[in-house]
Amino acid sequence: MSQGFRRFFPGATDQIPWGSALLSLIPLLFIGPISLVVSYHPGWDPARLPWVLPLYTALAIVMIFLGFILGLLRKFPRWSYPYAILVVILLTFAVTYLINRTPWDINHEGLILLLVVILSFLATRWLPATRPFYANLRHDWTLLSYGLYACTLFLFGTTDHDETPRLNLLVLLPSLVGLLGAVIHLRLASPIRRVAVLLLSMLVGVFLWVLPVFNGMMGSWGAFLVVLGLLLSAWGILVALILAPILINVFIRPKTMPSE
């Protein structure tokens, strides 16, 4: 690989211990495979929430905020970035509910998300406790790229029940692939290999996530092309999200690298 390309990648070579790596998977488990299991609960009824859903929601929120607080106290190590991203998502849902009395409103959610993201960014710059979140990114933009696993596993934790009415391995595979990619990402020391694994696991996960719809539309070329276009669009968005933090390293070059 040319030196010109390598200069876009940070020089960090930290290898996350197994304990921290497994700790980082807790929020991804809740928004990934566990979320799927809950959604296929036999007592599920949108009009009458089953007992397992409030229990799952409360436990997930508590674990996410505990992980975020622990990461805050530890000055945001790599494993804590998914927790921080999920806290922003939870705040978005909370603000939406306070405004519209509904946890999801397609007419306002985008603006609320943008507002929460802007306020969160300002908080990382102004509040001493959260300032390391941004300061760490100046030295290693792959921290934020790893944090985006929270968004991807949030996507993989949903499914079209009309296409797959029963919980099976194919439903769980996208989130399991994402979790495997997250573990490998944390255990690798090379930033270039981390990003490669991150991209590969997400691309495979999105393909498996779309596969049931893809199979259901094989009889029509028009439908086939529509699903293929959606698949390529999802891949393009994921690649852009993962590589976008590289701009932090391109335009804001740190003068000194932190000690390993």
Image (cartoon, rainbow, N blue to C red):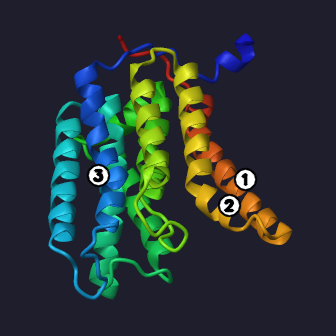
Tell me the mark number nearer the camera, choosing from 1 and 2: 2
Q: Residue at x 34, y 86 (%)?
A: 100
Three-letter residue code for mark 3: Phe
Q: Residue at x 26, y 42 (%)?
A: 26
In the displayed structure, 255 sits above or below 55; it is above
Q: Are marks 3 and 2 in contact (CB under 8 Å)?
A: no
Residue that carries the numbered disc 2 in the rendered image: 214
Three-letter residue code for mark 1: Leu
Tell me: 81 left or right of 188: left
Q: Residue at x 48, y 39 (%)?
A: 177
Query: Alpha-carbon distance for marks 3 and 1?
Result: 27 Å
Residue 152: give its label. Answer: none
In the displayed structure, 219 sits above or below 126; it is below
Tell me: 183 left or right of 217: left
For the question of whether residue 108 can be seen, the reply is yes
In the displayed structure, 210 sits above or below 255; it is below
**Sequence-earlier tag: 1 or 2:** 2
Residue that carries the numbered disc 3 in the rendered image: 30
Residue 232: give its label. Answer: 1
Residue 128 lies, in percent from the top left, at: 24, 41
Crowd class of label 2 (few under 14; some 14 to 19; many from 20; radius 10 Å): some
For mark 3, give the secondary structure.
Answer: helix
Q: Are marks 3 and 1 in contact (CB under 8 Å)?
A: no
Identify which residue, 250 or 208, lies in the foreground.
208
Quadrant placement of the C terminus: top left
For the question of whether residue 126 can be seen, the reply is no
Quadrant placement of the N terminus: top right
Query: Alpha-carbon distance for marks 1 and 2?
Result: 12 Å
